[in-house]
Image (cartoon, coloured by chain):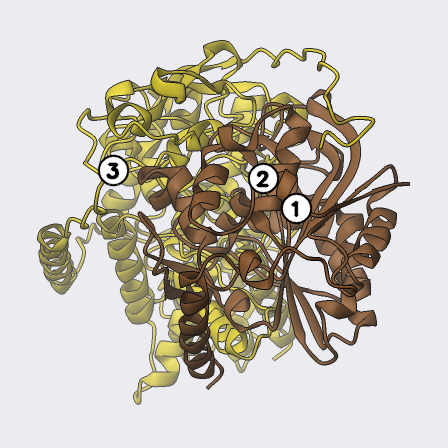
Chain colours: A brown, B yellow
Amino acid sequence: MKRREFVRKSVGAGFVTGTALAFGSINNLFGKVPLPDSPADLVAVKGGNPGQMFDRGIEALGGIEKFVKPNQTVVIKPNIGWDRGPEQAANTNPHLLTRIIEHCFKAGAKEVSVFDHTCDVWTKTYKNSGIEKAVKDAGGKIVPGNTEGYYQNVDIPKGVKLTSARVHELILESDVFINVPVLKHHSSSRLTISMKNLMGVVWDRRFWHRNDLHQCIADYATYERKPDLNIVDAYNVMMRNGPQGVSVSDIVNMKTQILTTDMVAADAAATKFFGSNPADVLYIRKANEMGVGEMDLEKLIIKRIMI
Amino acid sequence: MQYTSLKKLRVIISLIFFVLIALVFIDYRNIIPEEFARGALYLQFIPSLLKFINLLSVSVVGFIVVLVLTFVFGRVYCSSICPLGVFMDIVSFISRKLKKKKKRFRYKEPHNILRYSLLAITVIFFVAGSIYFILLLDPYSNFGRIITYFVNPVIILVNNGVASILGSFNVYAIFPVEIQSVRFELWIYPLLFLILVTWMSFTDGRLFCNTICPVGTLLGLLSRFSIFKIRFDEENCTSCGLCTRACKSDCLDFKDQIIDYSRCVECFNCLPVCPSEAIKYTYKKTKYHNSGIKKIKFDSLPDDYNKNKRKFLTLLLSVFAGSAIGSIKQDTQEGYKDSTVPEEKEFPVTPPGSLSIRNFTHNCTACSLCVSACPSNVLQPSFKEYGLTGMMQPFMDYHTGYCNFECTRCSEVCPTGAILSVQEDEKKQIQMGIAKFVKENCIVHTEKTDCGACSEHCPTKAVKMVPYEDDLLIPEVTDDICVGCGACEFACPTTPFKAIYVNGHSIHEIAKEPEEEKLEKPVGEDDFPF
């Protein structure tokens, strides 16, 4: 029943989005003039611990209540890909997740679920990343992501190479979708940030690798069920040997967080921490060209907070 | 009726061992601690013996405990400790419940040629350096295989069914687990064995233990001299025959008051049924005690045994042939062209802690505990990787999974010493093999697009991405820091041949630790770079 309802909804939503996109990107549609209640396109916070930075960042973005309404279901997609401890920053910071979940419940969320389609054995990565405990302690629900049965086929009409994908049911069913990537160097895609993190909501990743990885990442980013909020965890940043890292010597304590609704903007801003130009990361450039978001930081209203 | 509680005790102990050992094998969620698993398997005769020979350590003397137990109490091992023996009792129990006419055992002559030949072959092969007949006949290992190959998939299937029902209500407390798909051809032997054992115990109690099992035959040699024995007391005996009817080893003849102690498994079934206290379990010699066997007659197995066996074999072979024909090639993805260069592995990869192919194949009885315990599904029973005599001994199958960098589970649970216990830090440097890159198969080369799945999964960055044409990056292997975990091979998306695969070492080596370089100060450490 739930699924059928969803399919109906998503077809409708797809139609609306499709029409909207025909007139240009969503950003353009709503205009660049900041309204009094829409403070910024992107908030960057620096200098605190992950929880503090989130408190300040989300406040600057208008508060969690802007994204989570009472009685809604929330799905959070962190990076829990690797069987590594929190100190190695191969996975999203558990303290950040705790704080996000607390905020969601404060806003009246009915349920907050967390999952990732991991690379290493999921029971180990969930546990050793510290995320399982952090989520449970905060009252959230840990959901397995490594089961094909939880994935449902969806069409990606704007995809060039990736025209359909099997997506985890929580992404399709939840009212609110929060993407919480950790910023890392990445041997496949150069950098992993918001868009690359969404590889963990689909089932068949080998297809992406075989069929032009950058194009597939950008293709999936065009899919209509985009994250309602992206929170880039750049507290500890793996500067090389990503995405797993070899030791803590790969890590820099960057104490940064980026919050935005625009995945392309998030990724473009995060790229700067590596001294790179967003356009040099092929999937960011492609997603920008496909109208997923804005990679030109000059065109964005950025709010910078130093703690 | 004074022996009722002794028999009850035997049944309880049997069931405890059976359930514990079965649980150790079924534990697909790795809940049972390794120490507990080791404890539950401590007394298993063959694994303990092998580990003792391998390590010469006093910490593995389970088999000596068994020998002492046998010398004192008789073959209690067969009755209570051997999980396959208990399984046969359960089958026998069910057969008695099912049959309308109550099963009556009767005294039969032992199949001496068969049982001693099998024991001799097993021992001779073992002394000559081959574990092959132990692998085929050891009751514990066969029990383990049956659970791993046939029971676990069913249990996981049920688990997954429940999980998917709960999942549709968004309850994820029980989660689906990947079913370990043991290659179908490998079912043949364990399945035949299961059928044989089930049939033998269904029709004739402990016939298997006293005819085929080399452990049973070996302990039988010792139990003739055991201190405690079932003994007749002729003065009290009324020749009612109830004891013989109850004897599932067919080794008790009330007429001549013969008990064949080489076959008695100390099940104590004969004791409580005796109405006149004419049969006792005691260390004292009773009057007219008649030990050993009156006359030795060599029987061959019943005719229908061979006939049935042949029937099963044909059936299985035909099913196998059907499956070979039925394997269908999967459609390739659009846009991507198949890889062309076949993988050429010189040696299979043996698990970390196994030291070498030789050590592993000489000590592994293919009980498959490591296969069911491996959380990554990388340990799979082999088909022809180790040759015919190594069939079913597990190998690292990097097409089904890869060895988790931090995990030492297989080395902790292996009861035979084929995989020796290793520390976590030590394990991270065990080089089981080395990755070999085949550029001609690689996506970056053939499709001219970025990929890097191999390097992404590499825990030591022995597989690194280096500049290639047009701003692309292509993998390069640094041999001396590669541990051969197979993550690269597993992750490589090319089909049908991988562009990177691990060539096993015949003797494991030690990998170097990856070097740590100091990081340059990044741009955004103190301020926003935008």
**Whether residue A251 is visible:** yes
Q: Are marks 1 and 2 in contact (CB under 8 Å)?
A: yes
- What amino acid type is highlighted by mark number 2? Asp
Q: Can you identify the residue that label 1 sits on?
A: A300
Q: Callout 1: residue from which chain? A: A
Q: Is residue A103 left or right of residue B217?
A: right
Tell me if residue B37 can be seen. no
Camera-nearest residue between B105 and A166: A166
- Regarding mark 1 in the picture, which secondary structure is present there? loop
Q: Looking at the rendered structure, which numbered label has been put on residue B487?
A: none
Chain bearing tag 2 is A
Are dots 1 and 3 in contact, CB under 8 Å? no
Q: Which residue is mark 2?
A: A296
Return the x and y of residue B349 as percentages of the image width and height. 39, 26
Q: Which residue is mark 3?
A: B495
Q: Residues within 10 Å of mark 3 (few under 14, many from 20)?
A: some
Where A166 falls versus A206 (above or below)? below
Q: Nearer the viewer, residue A40 or A86?
A: A40
Task: Name the residue nearer the viewer: B239 or B347.
Answer: B347
Q: Identify residue type, mark 3.
A: Thr
Q: Is disc 2 surrounded by few (<14), some (14 to 19) or many (20+) residues within 10 Å?
A: some
In the rendered image, residue B254, in percent from the top left (x then y), is placed at: 39, 70
Amino acid on which the number 1 mark rests in the picture: Leu
Which residue is at a point 42% across and 82% down the rendered structure image?
Answer: A4
Identity of the residue drawn at 52% across and 24% down: B53
Circle nearer the viewer, 3 or 2: 2
Looking at the image, which residue sits at the far front?
Answer: A33
Residue B274 picture location, percent across and down: 52, 78
Q: CA distance from mark 1 to mark 2?
A: 7 Å
Q: Could you tell me how far apart the alpha carbons at marks 3 and 2 are, in whole angstroms?
A: 39 Å
